[in-house]
Amino acid sequence: DIQMTQSPSSVSASVGDRVTITCRASQDISSWLAWYQQKPGGAPKLLIYAASSLQRGVPSRFSGSGSGTDFTLSISSLQPEDFATYFCQQADTSPWTFGQGTKVEI
Amino acid sequence: QVQLVQSGAEVKKPGASVKVSCKASGDTFTGDYIHWVRQAPGQGLEWMGWIHPKSGGTKPVQKFQGRVTMTRDTSITTVYMELSRLTSDDTAVYFCANFDSHIYAFDLWGQGTLVTVSS
């Protein structure tokens, strides 16, 4: 199975900060990577697909980049509603696997 | 907007089975595949497998083979995930999610169903 490793596991930030989260795959997954946001008690929400494509309705302050094994999710100017946990997920090879999550805290 | 609506929370004893349902609010699934993902308390996301509602074809993850059954009703508006021989390690929130084959991502999720396994 492909292992997805996120870093950091948590980050403390303030409103207006730029936040970057990284995700590393244990083998080449091309651009088959998605990012999700999850708030406490809620379901994940798709933010980014195909490594860098913004899902409809997601604010443009979210962006993704990378290919192969190394990927990043950036939030350009953190807003109060962005405090949540973020997961990466590969869809290159079954079984689909997720990173362990990065909690963005105040 | 189409939503995936799941059944309510369940409490089960070890060794029992649980069946969770997932219904498309618009009476039709938008995608070809519905997947199941679970999340143990305070943990990450674990993919369990998929069902193709139109054909009934399934692909459970090897870890769950022999213990998970994915089915759909004859109207193809509801899918089910049944997990048997429950242990405390199966305590988790179970999500159904639509997989969009064009973007290769889960674009729509159910609200989740908490399954608690306790004696």
Image (cartoon, coloured by chain):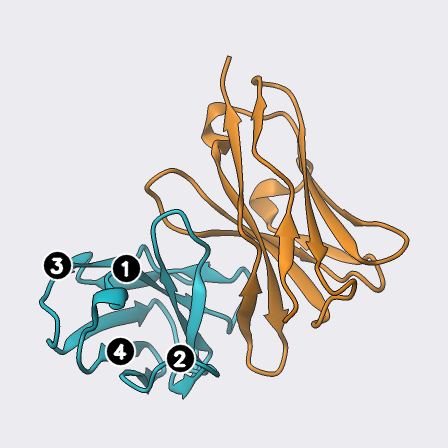
Chain colours: A cyan, B orange
**Mark 1 → mark 2, Cα distance in angstroms:** 15 Å
Residue A60, image x and y in percent?
Answer: 32, 87
Which residue is more in the foreground, A14 or A70?
A14
The residue to which callout 3 is attached is A106
The residue to which callout 2 is attached is A58
Which amino acid type is shown beneath numbered disc 2? Val
Q: Of the residues tagged 1 and 4, which is closer to the observer?
A: 1
Of helix, strand and loop, which one carries label 2? loop
- Mark 4 or mark 2: name the one nearer the start of the chain: 2
Judge left or right: residue A28 versus residue A95.
left
Q: Is residue A88 above or below residue B79?
A: below
Residue A87, image x and y in percent?
Answer: 35, 63
Q: Of the residues tagged 4 and 2, which is closer to the observer?
A: 2
Q: Is residue B65 above or below residue B35?
A: above
Of helix, strand and loop, which one carries label 4? strand
Residue plotted at (62% across, 65% down): B98
Report which quarter residue B63 is drawn in. Answer: top right
- Mark 1 or mark 3: name the one nearer the start of the chain: 1
- Labels 2 and 3 in the same subunit: yes
Which amino acid type is shown beneath numbered disc 3? Ile
Of helix, strand and loop, which one carries label 1? loop
The residue to which callout 1 is attached is A84
Residue plotted at (36% across, 82% down): A68
Which residue is more in the foreground, A76 or A1?
A76
